[in-house]
Amino acid sequence: MSQQMPVTRSSLRKAHAMSLPRPMPNVPDRVWSESEWQRIRLGYRAGSMDEKWNIYAEDDRLFLHRSWTGFLAYEAAFTKVDGGGRRITSALVESDPERYRSASADYDCLTLELVISTILLDERAEDLRTRMAAALRADTGSTAAAVAQHSVLGVRTPQTTTRPHRP
């Protein structure tokens, strides 16, 4: 069985820098294990129109781009923690509303963790999804949380070790 090749900036058709980066005042407090970090570093490449994210790592930084536009929405710096694992110690979010809609600092923190958990690690993340639904209701007044979550997260196509990365 061959090992999955990591997604890289150069393997993406579109990967634009942020036009108005803003430091995130809140970052997820989760500590990811070293094995989770290795999976995170592989990144993710959208394989269909229903997938919303292209993600790759460079050194200890993770870059999360919207797949359709190639706009960078989040950039997160991971640092090793005592006792093992890694945590996000700083992050940037795109603040240009023409490129990415950021509802609030808490929403951005939650979205960043949810994308990592559901898209990169293929976790169900029910608690994060429940918190996202509540945040979306608070921010938009909409009760259509499932539809709103789909617009934020998209779907995740199962990755295989033989799935080719398209040029």
Image (cartoon, helix red, strand yellow):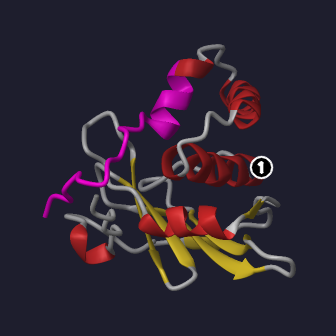
Q: Which residue is mark 1?
A: 106
Res 23 seen here: no
- Magenta region's main secondary structure? loop
Q: Nearer the viewer, residue 89 or 87?
A: 87
* Kind of residue at badge 1: Asp
Is 82 located above or below residue 47 in the figure?
Answer: below
Question: Which residue ends up furthest to the left in the rendered image?
Answer: 167
**Residue at screen point 35% across, 40% down:** 51
Q: Nearer the viewer, residue 76 or 78?
A: 78
**Residue at screen point 68% across, 36% down:** 125
| Horizontal relation, residue 29 to residue 1: left or right | right
Q: Quadrant of residue 75?
A: bottom right
Q: Where's residue 117, x and y in %? A: 61, 48
Which residues are the magenta region? 147-167
Q: Where's residue 105, x and y in %? A: 75, 54
Q: Crowdedness of circle 1 by 10 Å Cα count: few (<14), some, many (20+)?
A: some
Q: Where's residue 6, x and y in %? A: 35, 69
Res 167 seen here: yes
Question: Which residue ends up furthest to the top in the rendered image?
Answer: 143
User: What is the quadrant of the N terminus in the image?
Assistant: bottom left
**Residue at screen point 71% across, 24% down:** 137
Question: Which residue ends up furthest to the bottom in the rendered image?
Answer: 59
Q: Quadrant of residue 18?
A: bottom left
